[in-house]
Amino acid sequence: MTRASPAAREPLRLLSIVIPARDEEGCISSTVEHLYVELRLHGVPHEIIVVDDGSSDSTWETLLQLRHRVPTLNPLQNEGLHGFGRAIVRGLDHMRGDAVVVMMADESDDCRDVVRYWQLLNDGWDAVFGSRFIKGGGVIDYPWIKMRVNRLANLFIRMMFHVRLNDTTNAFKAYRRTVIDGCRPLLSPHFNLTVELPLKTIVRGYSWTVMPITWRNRRTGEAKLKIKEMGSRYLFICLYVWLEKYFSRGDYHRTS
C-alpha cells in the first residue's frame, strides 16, 4: 500500500520521537527507557521529546529525574492550552531532527517499530503509516467497543478519501520534517491531529507507505481518548481536508 515511490535522498541525520504525556507517572519511565535502549541498540541517532500536557501527578518530576539516565531525553511542558494535539505540536515546534515519529506514552506502541520507521524513511519515503490491521500487524486487549468504533471510523475515511490506508486514526506514524512543515498550519488541538497529519500528507502529494505495527492496551493509568467527545472533532477535520482536496485547486500541494 503505497502512494508514488520513494525518492533517492541523502541519509537522515537525526530522528525525533515526540511523546505527549498527561498523568503518566506509572509508565513514562519504562516507555522512555525501553525506547532509548532499542534505539541505541540499532544505532539510531535520536532525541526523545516528552511533552507534559498539564499533568496533575508526578509525571514532570519523573521526567526530570529520568534525564540523568537517558541523555537523549528532552522533557518539555505544554504551558499554554492543553490538549493531545497541542502537546504534539509543541513537540514538533522544538524538534531538532529531520524526521519524527509520534508515539504514545503508555507503552501501547512497540519501540521496535520505531526502528523500522527510521529504516523506511531512509529508503526515501516522505511518510510511513503504521497499521494494526494488515498482515503482520496486531492488537492485544483492544476493548471491543473501541474496536467497533475504530473500524467504522476508518472505513468512513477510506471511502471519503478513496485511499487504501485502513488505520488513519492511529497516532503512531513517522514523517520527514519537510512533511510536517508542508502540512502546517496544524489545526487540531485534540486527538483529531492523528487524522489531520496523515490526510494532509496524502492530499498534499507526499509519498507514503504502510507497514504493519503492533499495539497493546495500556496496563497502567487511564486512557485519555474519550470517544463521545471526539466524533464531531474528527468529522470537522475530515471535512476540512476533504474540502482542501477537491476545492483548493492545488494551492497547498507539494511543489517539489
Image: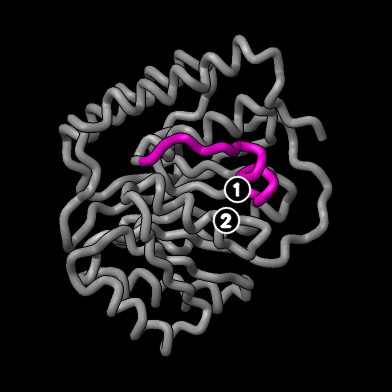
Residue at (36% x, 21% y) in the render: 235
Q: Position of residue 78 (x, y in %)?
A: 38, 59
The three-letter code of the residue at mark 1 reads: Tyr
Q: Position of residue 111 (x, y in %)?
A: 44, 63
* Total numbered labels: 2
Secondary element type, mark 2: strand
Question: The N terminus appears in which quarter of the rendering?
Answer: top right
Residue wearing tag 1: 175
Q: Is residue 130 above or below residue 58?
A: above
Q: Which residues are magenta?
A: 176-189
Question: The C terminus appears in which quarter of the rendering?
Answer: top right
Query: Is 131 left or right of 147, judged from the image as shown?
Result: right
Residue wearing tag 2: 100
* Colour pattern of the rendering: one colour
Q: Residue furthest bottom?
A: 68
Does the CB distance between marks 2 and 1 fall below 8 Å? yes
Residue at (62% x, 75% y) in the render: 43
Residue sitting nearer the eye, 45 or 23: 23
Within 10 angstroms of label 2, few (less than 14), some, or many (20 or more) residues? many
Badge 2 or badge 1: first in the primary sequence: 2
Residue sitting nearer the eye, 144 or 33: 33
